[in-house]
Image: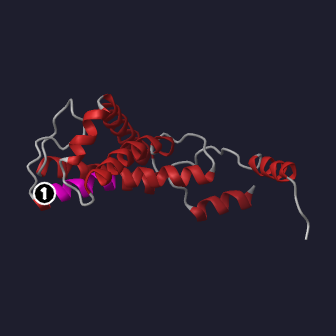
Amino acid sequence: MKITTFFEQRSRIIENMNKVVATPAPKPHSETAKRIAWIYAASLVVMAVAQLFAFEDFIPQIRNYFLPGGYGTANLVASLIVVTEIFALPFLLRMPLSPLMRWCSLVCAVVAAFLWVMLSVWAVATDAAITNSALLGTKVTVPTGFIALATSLTLFVLAAWSAWGLWPNARKNKRVTSSQ
């Protein structure tokens, strides 16, 4: 059994770090999918900026949903919403990323919309007396109910379309690489 020193382990870690390379984004399935992704990215930017503009008021607005778990869950959900909206942007804008980061960004794009759908359904199902759904933070009031549910479902459709349209087709890429 060989005992490795800290410096040997460090050098192995550094060697492995050099193997992670950002690759350019694959071509989208269609030009429409690319435009949908840009629309979804623009809406996420507007939402994230509006939510972060007064984040100290955004957290209590999420607390008004009276989620199970109380304040801790509300804090977690509010933070998760903003983080997923921001980390979804690299995938949607087709930035050069490592494959793992591309997957993480794709998941964030879908999870951000999914969280808003779940909050909107929760507000409708519990018949909560919430005046602002907080989709655009606390400075711009978006009423709960049908408007918030329709908006969040639209975001989810945009997220699903973007995920399908921007992710590479495995068979198409194999044909391209085998012909080269």
**Category of crowding for the residue at label 1, using alpha-carbon neighbours closer than 10 angstroms: few (below 14), some (14–19), many (at least 20):** some
Quarter of the image with the N terminus in it: bottom right
- Pick the residue in front: 89 or 67: 67
Reply above or below: 150 against 134.
below
Counting from the top left corner in percent of width and height, residue 142 is at 16, 39
The residue located at (67%, 57%) in the rendering is 176
Q: Is residue 73 visible?
A: yes
> Along the horizontal axis of the image, is 166 left or right of 177?
left
Magenta segment main secondary structure: helix
Which residue appears farthest toward the right when viewing the image? Answer: 2
Q: Residue at x 89, y 63 (%)?
A: 3
Query: Residue 127's x, y, as percent?
Result: 8, 57
SS under mark 1: helix
Q: Is residue 118 magenta?
A: yes
Q: Which residue is mark 1?
A: 124
| Residue 25: x %, y % from top left | 58, 45
Quadrant of the frame with the C terminus: bottom right
The span shown in magenta is 113-123
Q: Is residue 157 left or right of residue 129?
A: right
Q: Is residue 177 magenta?
A: no
Q: Is residue 82 above or below residue 68?
A: above
